[in-house]
Amino acid sequence: QVQFVESGGGVVQPGRSLRLSCAASGFSLSAYNIHWVRQAPGKGLEWVALIYYDGNQKYHADSVKGRFTISRDNSQNSLYLHMDGVSAEDTAIYYCTTFSIWGQGTMVTFSS
Amino acid sequence: DVVMTQSPLSLPVTLGQPASISCRSSQSLVHSDGNIYLDWFQQRPGQSPRRLIYEVSNRDSGVPDRFSGSGSGTDFTLKISRVEAEDVGVYYCMQGSHWPPWTFGQGTKVEIK
């Protein structure tokens, strides 16, 4: 089955960093531009970041710019989101997606 | 940024009856290449989003033909011809014509009366 498998979520305390991972299952992600999209509890969908298939272009939402960094390793068939400066507003389920392919998401919770 | 506005935000429907969701953008979604990058997603309770429609009116693989998308410019519509119990969930429109960022509507919750 073609899908993404996200991991790395958890409880983040002030000053700590977190790295989310996204593995492709059933296909090679090397040909795809891939996004991170998040969903705060009980809220709608928010685009977070995009990385081109070759890693050469990256875009981040203003809400995370300077704090989060998207990256990928096609040799590992994986995508990442490095999160620094996490705050309560970042509490959400994080999905990696091509928009046609989604994962089950990984939950990030900020705890002071 | 392009603002996407959906209506209604809550839509109680009777099984077997049609349903319609509106999505309006704050500016035309016609891309410089002439295409319109407007997608529709379904999110069933407790599940990840699933794309139903891409580029206004193209159904994704496996999507029942009771779902259809239409529209142009700034006004778009998702229609369900006959609502089934499995259609309960939240529906989002999203534009990808003017990015970054990709922007979503607030979501429309479809429930059975």
Image: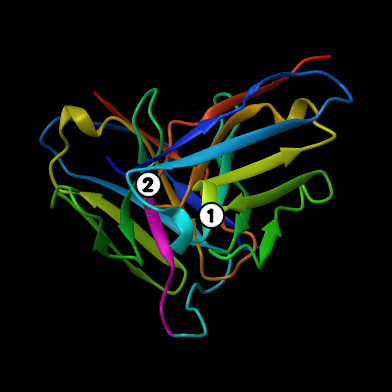
Residue B66: % across, % down:
14, 49
* Residue A54 position (above or below residue A21): below
**Visible in this render: residue B104?**
no
Q: Chain of mark 2?
A: B
- From the viewer's side, name the closer residue of B81 and B42: B42
> Quick check: B36 left or right of B4?
left
Magenta span contains residue B35: yes
**Going by the image, does B105 lie left or right of B100?**
left
Q: Which chain does the residue under circle 1 lie in? A: A
State which quadrant residue B16 falls in: top left
The disc at residue B41 is 2
Q: Position of residue A39 (x, y in %)?
A: 57, 34
Residue closest to the far right: A15
**In the image, residue A55 lies at what x, y percent?**
62, 62
Amino acid type, mark 2:
Phe
Point out the stretch of residues depicted in magenta.
B34-41
Which residue is located at x 17 percent, y 48 percent?
B62
Q: Which residue is mark 1?
A: A74
Image coordinates of residue B7 in percent, x first then y, are 43, 47
Q: How many marks?
A: 2
Of badges 2 and 1, nearer the viewer stands 1
Kindly indicate whether the residue at mark 1 contacts the one at mark 2 (C-beta within 8 angstroms).
no
Q: Which amino acid, mark 1?
A: Asn
Residue A24 in view, yes or no: yes
Residue A20 part of the magenta segment: no
Q: CA distance from mark 2 to mark 1?
A: 27 Å
Viewer-proximal residue, B46 or B11?
Answer: B46
* Residue positioned 59% across, 51% down in the render: A73
